[in-house]
Image (cartoon, rainbow, N blue to C red):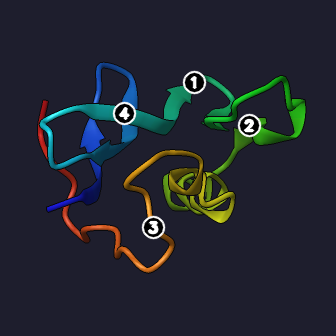
Amino acid sequence: MVKIYWQESRNGQKLILDIETGETITLGAVRKTRNGFDAFATTLGYDPGRAVKGIPELQGAKVFVESFEPWNLFQGGDESLPIEPDVRTM
């Protein structure tokens, strides 16, 4: 079963696409900085609009990443998949 979830990372959280084959793909990430949170959504080319710095809240940074629906770029990703509500540990 394909899953999308947030997972803790060293400095923040990563949005993960977990494909049935056991492969995981990082769809985006947020990280804590002195100036708030930096966020980026994965893209297949160069798109500076998919990254932003200094978002004041973690939830706002996560909403930014999710708004691009980066899972649609990958085989097995589907816009109808829900993102699991709980953040997984490392």
State the residue position of label 4. 25
Amino acid carrying label 3: it is Asp
Amino acid type at circle 4 is Ile
Q: Residue at x 75, y 35 (%)?
A: 51
The first of marks 4 and 1 along the sequence is: 4
The reply to whether dot 4 and dot 1 touch (C-beta < 8 Å) is no
Sequence-earlier tag: 1 or 2: 1
Sequence-wise, the earlier of marks 3 and 1 is 1
Q: Is residue 48 left or right of residue 4?
A: right
Q: Of helix, strand and loop, which one carries label 3?
A: loop
State the residue position of label 3: 78
73 or 31, which lies in front? Answer: 73
Q: State the residue in front, 67 or 31.
A: 67
Which is more foreground, mark 3 or mark 2?
A: 3
Rendered image: mark on residue 54: 2
Query: Does 27 sit left or right of 41 as displayed?
Result: left
**How far is disc 3 from disc 1 in space, using C-alphas?**
31 Å
Quarter of the image where the C terminus is located = top left
Distance from disc 1 to disc 2, alpha carbons, whole Å, reads 8 Å
Q: CA distance from mark 2 to mark 4?
A: 25 Å
Q: List the residue tagged with mark 1.
A: 33
* N-terminal-most mark, 2 or 4: 4
Circle nearer the viewer, 3 or 4? 3
Q: Are marks 2 and 4 in contact (CB under 8 Å)?
A: no
The residue carrying pointer 4 sits among few (fewer than 14), some (14 to 19) or many (20 or more) residues within 10 Å by Cα, namely some
Looking at the image, do the residues carrying marks 3 and 2 touch, with CB atoms under 8 Å apart? no
- Residue 67: x and y, percent? 66, 64
Q: Earlier in the sequence, mark 3 or mark 2?
A: 2
